[in-house]
């Protein structure tokens, strides 16, 4: 089921419920295996904040106990995080959507084709335009493109946009600043993850913008592990990925997901 704009905006409010639920989560047990994971230095509700809160961290805290590991976190710009993973300077990076090109950075659960059962979460990208603008998306083709389409620096939706033969603007701007660029005519529109789209459409510029309800793409997001870790300790890697699957399918974590409405049945 494709989420509507109303449903997406409502998720921001429901994420407050998650904050209350998270206060009761138990601390991880002592773990003998220490792994360093990097993540992007931006807020992506309800999954994570720069302060280390959100559902990604709630999942990983539970994985620590199940897999008998201990995670430490490094917050970085996304491209730098992936570069460190490729150089084996961190043990893992989250959350990463699958593409064949990204296998150069490390290993997805499942190897050549990511195992969807071991995803951390699921998300969609939507097209945002100036209210009344002709830019359109029918689920297969973009039409009436009068300029560049913006997307977040390093995000894989850029690959799809390039395959659609449109000019792109790869940016590190906040959702609000991307909205300002759309309204100023500096870009024709933006491909935004559902959480970023919710922030923009729920904010002061929302009344001047349209969000098209047909997703550009729907993606699963994973914890990638480094080539060095998977090669030297494959059993440990499998333990971590199996822990992710078990936590995501568990009733306790499921209640947190249900409170946000973001994860859809697959």
Image (cartoon, rainbow, N blue to C red):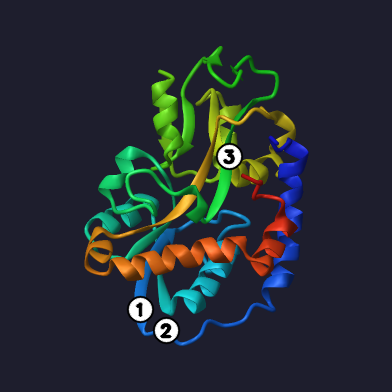
Residue 89 in percent (x, y) is at: 25, 65
Residue 55 in percent (x, y) is at: 60, 63
Task: Name the residue tied to disc 1.
Answer: 34
Near mark 1 (Cα within 10 A), the count class, few <14, some 14-19 or many ≥20, is few
Near mark 3 (Cα within 10 A), the count class, few <14, some 14-19 or many ≥20, is many
Is disc 3 in contact with disc 2, using a CB cutoff of under 8 Å?
no
- The residue at the point 43 percent across, 28 percent down is 160
Q: CA distance from mark 3 to mark 2?
A: 34 Å
- The residue at the point 74 percent across, 59 percent down is 259
Horizontal side of 19 relative to 38 (left or right) equals right
- The residue at the point 62 percent across, 81 percent down is 26
Of residues 70 and 231, the one nearer the viewer is 231
The image quadrant that residue 131 belongs to is top right
Q: Which numbered disc covers residue 31?
A: 2
Is disc 1 in contact with disc 2, using a CB cutoff of under 8 Å?
yes
Task: Name the residue tied to disc 3.
Answer: 124
Near mark 2 (Cα within 10 A), the count class, few <14, some 14-19 or many ≥20, is some
């Amino acid at each position: 089921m494709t989420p509507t704009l109303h449903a997406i905006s409502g998720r921001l409010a429901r994420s407050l419920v998650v904050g209350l639920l998270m206060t009761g989560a138990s601390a991880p047990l002592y773990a003998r295996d220490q792994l360093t994971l990097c993540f992007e230095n931006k807020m992506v509700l309800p999954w994570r904040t720069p302060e280390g809160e959100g559902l990604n961290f709630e999942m990983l805290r539970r994985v620590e106990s199940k897999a008998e590991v201990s995670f430490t976190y490094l917050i970085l710009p996304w491209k730098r995080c992936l570069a460190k993973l490729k150089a084996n300077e961190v043990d893992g990076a989250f959350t990463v959507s699958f593409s064949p090109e990204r296998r150069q950075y490390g290993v997805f659960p499942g190897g050549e084709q990511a195992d969807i059962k071991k995803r951390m979460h699921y998300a969609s990208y939507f097209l945002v335009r100036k209210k009344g603008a002709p830019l359109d998306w029918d689920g297969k083709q973009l039409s009436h493109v009068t300029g560049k389409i913006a997307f977040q620096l390093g995000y894989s939706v850029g690959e799809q946009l390039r395959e659609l033969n449109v000019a792109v603007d790869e940016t590190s701007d906040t959702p609000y600043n991307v909205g300002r660029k759309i309204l100023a005519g500096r870009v024709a529109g933006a491909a935004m993850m559902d959480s970023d789209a919710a922030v923009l459409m729920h904010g002061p510029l929302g009344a001047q913008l349209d969000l098209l309800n047909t997703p550009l793409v729907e993606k699963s997001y994973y914890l990638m592990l480094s080539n060095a870790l998977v090669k030297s300790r494959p059993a440990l890697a499998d333990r971590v990925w199996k822990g992710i699957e078990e936590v995501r399918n568990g009733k306790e974590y499921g209640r947190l997901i249900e409170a946000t409405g973001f994860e859809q049945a697959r």
